[in-house]
Amino acid sequence: MRQELASTREIAVRTICALRLAAAWMAVTAPATAAAQPAAPAALVEQAFEAAGRGDLAPVERALREARGAEAVLLRARLAAASYQGAPHRDAALVRLATSGSPAEQGAALNVIASAAFVAGDYAAAAQAAERLAGLLRANGDAGAVAAIEMTRQVAAMLAAHPAQRVEGAVAHQGVPLRYDAVGLPRIDIGINGGTQEAVVDTGANLSVLSAETARRLGINVADSSGHVGNAAGGTVAVRIGIAERVTIAGTTLRNVPFLIIDDAQLTFQVAGGYRIQAILGLPVLRALQRIRIGRETFAVEAPQAYDAVRQNLFANNSNLFVRAQVGGRDVPLHLDTGANQTSLTALFAQAHPQLVAELRTGEQQLASAGGARVNNGAVWPNPTIGVAGRSITLPSINIALATAADNYGTLGSSALRRFASYAIDFPAMRLEPGDPAPR
């Protein structure tokens, strides 16, 4: 008999899903049914790119030690993009591959260029690369991958029509009060165009977000053009682009900050007592602050540390951050998502550890996201330990999805992060640094 595992307050909430590019590598390089196919890169490189999409960069590093020529160019660019180091989308060798390599090499190069350019805020380059990549995917007959790339192209093209986001003056190292809302997500007050607005701090959002009503109230300039982004419930959400002339966060001022504008109904969640989100601070804004610390009652901007590849434990797939973690003693790269109220594992983790899952209780689990919700069949793992950077905590339980397709192993969400007294996210150093476990 199926058991209901989540009470209403325990429903997993995910604010907004990521723009996705990861599927394009395998879609372009996998053999199609046509008789004549270009030679694909070595299987080792394909496997390395696929693993990188799940947040695991070890296969990229191993493959790079033996790679030569085009394969080495692709792997170096993928590794640089995953570490937010340099400007891999402008690498001359990668750009040449994108125009003169084999179709498979062109697809892989364009994938890296589009994602790295988007992360860097070079939206015109991202849109152009995504458009060319979509053309390759159409020729390969992969309509699903074309749809995913088209979402990125649409949003990048809309952003390219506006001035680039910038920090005005120096980043201030200050703190402001932080509070956790009814479902456990961190919120702070920020300034937008001279007004005050509460916003969720969300490392899982590729762009910042405002509800349509909030955008109107704050005088946001909203473009007429529209596009779509994916949500965590497996659907899409209609969006427009709005530009805030001035945003202030903990003493730092940013200019020309882009926001996805979403209908208010899409940011209202079916939680007992009612729950809605009016604003989300996404990854581009948080990265501009360089190093942030989230505590139980304070959000602080701190001086960043220098990048050190040996100490790095954060890796990026496009605009998605992954952290090297240990779950129940097992090494697992987890999506670092402060905008997810629950820490959870996916069907990919279940497939990798069938013996563990076979011993667990199963039932239904509900996930609510911007624009929809879904019910998954899943298992409950009681009392697992979560370890990051030498610190560890124990959760009462973790849900493991069993039937829903996934492109990563799971999410490190607020339910685990809140169990540390504080944690710092250092973007230049690419490190998550948890503090001591918080007293219970």
Image (spheres, grey):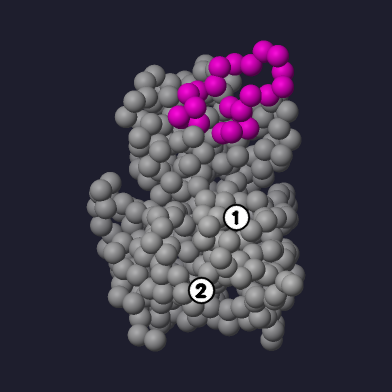
Q: Looking at the rendering, in which quadrant would you find the C terminus?
A: bottom left
Q: Looking at the rendering, in which quadrant would you find the N terminus?
A: bottom right
Left or right, 137 with respect to 389, comes to: right
Res 254 seen here: no
Residue 385 against residue 244 in the figure, above or below = below
Quarter of the rendering containing residue 136: top right
Determine the CA span between mark 2 and mark 1: 17 Å
Closest to the observer: 176 or 360?
360
x%, y% of residue 229? 67, 52
Q: Residue at x 57, y 68 (%)?
A: 360
x%, y% of residue 343? 51, 67
Element on which disc 2 rests: strand
Res 435 seen here: yes
x%, y% of residue 36? 67, 13
Label 1: which residue? Answer: 347
Q: Residue at x 70, y 14 (%)?
A: 35
Q: Please state which of the two labelled residues, at mark 2 or mark 1, is closer to the viewer.
A: 2
Identified by mark 2, the residue type is: Pro
Label 2: which residue? Answer: 382
Q: Which range is magenta?
A: 25-46
